[in-house]
Image: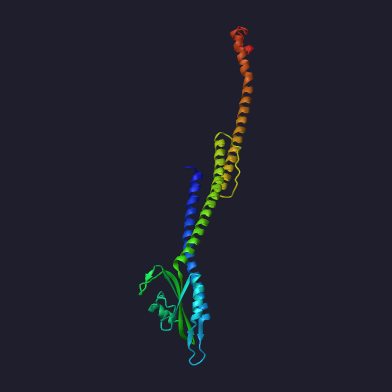
Amino acid sequence: MKMIYQQLLAFFLVIAVTILLLGFSFGRMSKSFVYDDEWRSLEKYSDSLVQQSLTVNSKGNQKVSFSLSTLKTTQALLENQSVHFTVFNQKNQVIYPNNGLSPKVTKSDWRHLTKDQIVRKVNNRNFRLNNGKTRPAMIEILKPYYYNKKLVAVVSAGAFISDVNSNVDRINRDLLKGLGVSLIISMIISFFIASRLNRRISRLRAAATQVSNGNYEIRVKSGGKDEIGELITDFNHMTESLEKANQEIERQEERRQEFLADAAHEMRTPLTTISGILEGIKYDVIPQEHPEEKY
């Protein structure tokens, strides 16, 4: 496998794992964020409901009651926003509405409410009530209200879990689209980075081929301060050393040639004389009785 493909595969694996982890984390965060936001909204609806409908009789023992007309009006407004509520008195009895679909407050939840604690609940499944009717899965909040340090009412406000989950799904879809686009952009950037690294390595390999063919003058541009850049710098130092060594070898060869030429010149004169004498003897140019005198 070529290095560019290895680099692309490595980049892809790192980016894919990172995006998967981010997607999983953001998916869980988005669900938690949507649920928290829904609970805060339900709490605001509950506060608004109590402020508008709760009345206190200033005569006698200051009896606390709710305005049914206000409750009906508020119910109509909240149902348009898919919000449903139930009002309980201090004895855990339903005040409004009496439609048989009101949730029951468990003893455990009631203990928290009597301690002025807000209860947040998520019912992920539909369940059947005692009257045979089915209550859909809901996300709810139970909030107690006190007057003169006495519990006077508990409001249960809830929204259908299907509506809340649809918001979560929409956020997750948008998140997946964003992560998909990020993955594509990251792969494009990774391709250019890998291509750049591959081009630098290819230039270095081509230069090494020229060095093996005897070209020691080749130099490669570093193009960076990373490990490949350091390798290219070392390669340039190596070729520079090889060039100097080759130049020194050429100078030594020139000196050797000059020495051999001088030696041959110095030896040429006596050799020529000896050769002439031998030729003279061979052709009787020099008398045999006095060859030493001629010499």
Instruction: Give x and y (percent) for residue 94.
Output: 42, 80
Relative to residue 258, is residue 86 drawn left or right? left
Which sits in the foreground, 272 or 206? 206
Which sits in the foreground, 210 or 47? 47
Quadrant of the rendered structure where residue 255 is?
A: top right
Instruction: Give x and y (percent) for residue 288.
Output: 59, 8
Q: Residue at 49% across / 51% down in the picture? A: 12
Quadrant of the rendered structure where residue 203 is?
A: top right
Quadrant of the rendered structure where residue 106 is?
A: bottom left
Q: How many marks?
A: 0
Q: Is residue 138 visible?
A: yes
Relative to residue 285, is residue 99 drawn left or right? left
Which sits in the foreground, 236 or 57? 57
Which sits in the foreground, 245 or 279? 245
Instruction: Give x and y (percent) for residue 143.
Output: 46, 78
Q: Residue at 51% across / 75% down in the picture? A: 45
Instruction: Give x and y (percent) for residue 111.
Output: 40, 80
Relative to residue 280, is residue 105 drawn left or right? left
Where is 119 relative to 240, above or below? below
Q: Residue furthest bottom?
A: 60
Relative to residue 181, is residue 89 drawn left or right? left
Where is 67 relative to 294, above or below? below
Q: Quadrant of the C terminus?
A: top right
